[in-house]
Image (tube, rainbow, N blue to C red):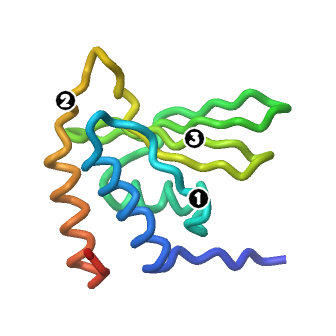
Amino acid sequence: MRGTYQFTNQDRDRIFFALRDLINQRPYDSVSLVGANVSLCDCQDALEELGYEQEDSDNNGWEMDFWWTFEAVGLPAIMVGGCGYTGDLYIYFKDQDLENPDIDTEALRQRINERWEKYGLNRA
């Protein structure tokens, strides 16, 4: 059986909107992708398009919680986490905490805007 997975412009747009929401928050918090109709694989594809690479992954086994770390030179590290049992999926900055409230997000914002222009996506 052959897989039918395709990363579409709609998937890309949904994840870029979530990243934009993440960038615009103060203080930073996670952005839920529940109900956005995107998968962990979609998140990975979108982040790789922005120059990120998956650096680490972890899970807690039978509870089906997972955390994937993505890093890129000159960009803030991003985590994608969730739960396979409940279907939760969220995205957040790896280093978001009270010790580091001012994450530099301008380069990430520029890369997202470049991709939106490349694919002619909705930036509303």
Which of the two residues, 56 or 113, is positioned nearer the viewer here? 113
Which residue lies under the disc numbered 1? 41
**Separation of marks 2 and 1 at Cα, in angstroms:** 29 Å
Dot 2, how many residues are within 10 Å of its Cα: few (below 14), some (14-19), or many (20+)? few
Q: Decide: marks 3, 1 in contact (CB < 8 A)?
A: no
Q: Return the disc, 3 or 2, that comes first in the chain's sequence.
A: 3
Q: Which secondary structure lies at badge 2?
A: loop
Q: Quadrant of the C terminus?
A: bottom left
Image location (x, y in percent) of residue 89? 60, 49
- Residue at 42 percent across and 40 percent down: it is 92
Numbered disc in front, either 3 or 2: 2
Numbered disc in front, either 3 or 1: 3
Q: Quadrant of the N terminus?
A: bottom right
Image location (x, y in percent) of residue 107? 16, 49
Q: Amino acid at mark 1?
A: Cys
What's the mark number on residue 81? 3
Q: Decide: marks 3, 2 in contact (CB < 8 A)?
A: no
Asked where in the image residue 15 lies, by quadrant, the reply is bottom left
- Residue at 35 percent across and 26 percent down: it is 95
Q: Amino acid at mark 3?
A: Gly
Which of the two residues, 33 or 72, is positioned nearer the viewer here? 33
What's the mark number on residue 102? 2
Asked where in the image residue 116 lies, by quadrant, the reply is bottom left
Q: Amino acid at mark 2?
A: Asp
